[in-house]
Amino acid sequence: MARITAGIATSHVPLLGVAADTGKDRDAYFGPIFAGYDWTREWIARAENKPDVVILVYNDHASAFDMKIIPTFAIGCGERYKPADEGWGPRKVPDVEGHPDLAWHIAQSLILDEFDMTIINEMDVDHGLTVPLTMMYGAPENWPAKVIPLAVNVVTYPPPSGNRCWALGEAIARAVASFGEDLNVQIWGTGGMSHQLQGPRAGLINAEWDNMFLDGMVGTTQKLRTIPHIEYLRETGSEGIEMVMWLIMRGALGRETKALHRHYHVPCSNTAIGHIVLEPVDGTVPPSPTLEGNNAAAQAAI
């Protein structure tokens, strides 16, 4: 049986990819940021912690989706994803290898659980997905884990609520647990933390609020799922809403978590960098509230 063994959250600032790709990751500016990921790189390389599959929650930045189509939740079910050209050529990082069998199983389970997922079989993936891989794995010839991309709309209003994202995480946990193959699965939530890229408040960073959010990822509290959109906007800037993607990861870890590692740094460009590694203490998630979601025969069809 597949199992979710850990959750990782991280910012996905594109400048981190530039620093890594140009050998500046240990200079005076970027060194303290990357040093905060050294623990995780060592931890994830150990055999007992190495995931077979990563469900990577991120947002696309007009690389695969644009104003013509804006899915709230989209899951990648393809075999392979190439790095996107974001205007200056694709990053010279490995292609991302998917896990179609698990991805299709999750997609079916979520749809029967009444989450209206968009299924993507072909797309390129931008810095929202490749930068987290770089931060955890460095520059390998091939990424060590297969990846299931899960794209969330946090660019165009209305984005999903934090509560809906947390519930999606719980549904993902149920889906993974019903997959028959023995797989070590991690789920990563990316984006944030506080930042605003434009307008009179450009450059806004709220370290106090960010650390409150990091605190809320740990233990049994579910207070983060009730934060309204307007609070993200007011306290963390127009792009701070990306943090709802962390709640998908947190919801998938169950009733209680403990923190294995935590890192916070400001600034990176005009963004607060946040990173946390969580382990489920009690991975219990509520049963599905839907008819089909509780139909074991339907859930096991793929």
Image (cartoon, grey):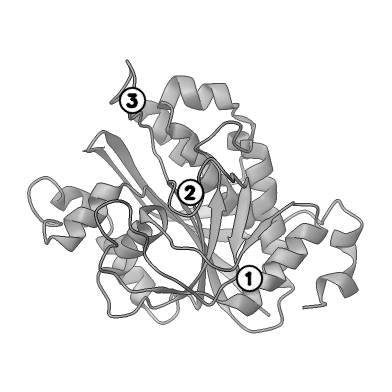
* Mark 3 vs 2, N-terminal side: 2
- Determine which residue is flagged by label 2: 59
Task: Report helix, strand or loop for mark 2.
Answer: loop
* Mark 1 vs 2, N-terminal side: 2
Q: Is residue 250 above or below residue 21?
A: above
* Mark 3 vs 1, N-terminal side: 1
- Quadrant containing the N terminus in the rendered view: bottom right
C-alpha distance separating marks 3 and 2: 18 Å
Marks 3, 1: nearer the viewer: 3
The residue under label 3 is which amino acid type? Gln
Q: Which residue is nearer to you in this view: 255 or 77?
A: 77
The residue under label 2 is which amino acid type? Asn
221 with respect to 198 (left or right) = right
Spot the residue most to the front: 68
Count of marks, rendered view: 3
Number of other residues with Cα within 10 Å of mark 2, as a class: few under 14, some 14 to 19, many 20 or more: many
Q: Which residue is nearer to you in this view: 61 or 146?
A: 61
Q: Residue at x 11, y 56 (%)?
A: 24
Number of other residues with Cα within 10 Å of mark 1, as a class: few under 14, some 14 to 19, many 20 or more: many
Q: Name the quadrant containing residue 21.
A: bottom left
Q: Is residue 187 above or below residue 2?
A: above
- Quadrant containing the C terminus in the rendered view: bottom right
Q: Position of residue 50 (x, y in %)?
A: 43, 76
C-alpha distance separating marks 3 and 1: 36 Å
Q: Residue at x 87, y 71 (%)?
A: 298
C-alpha distance separating marks 1 and 2: 18 Å
Q: Is residue 257 above or below residue 144?
A: above
- Determine which residue is flagged by label 1: 103
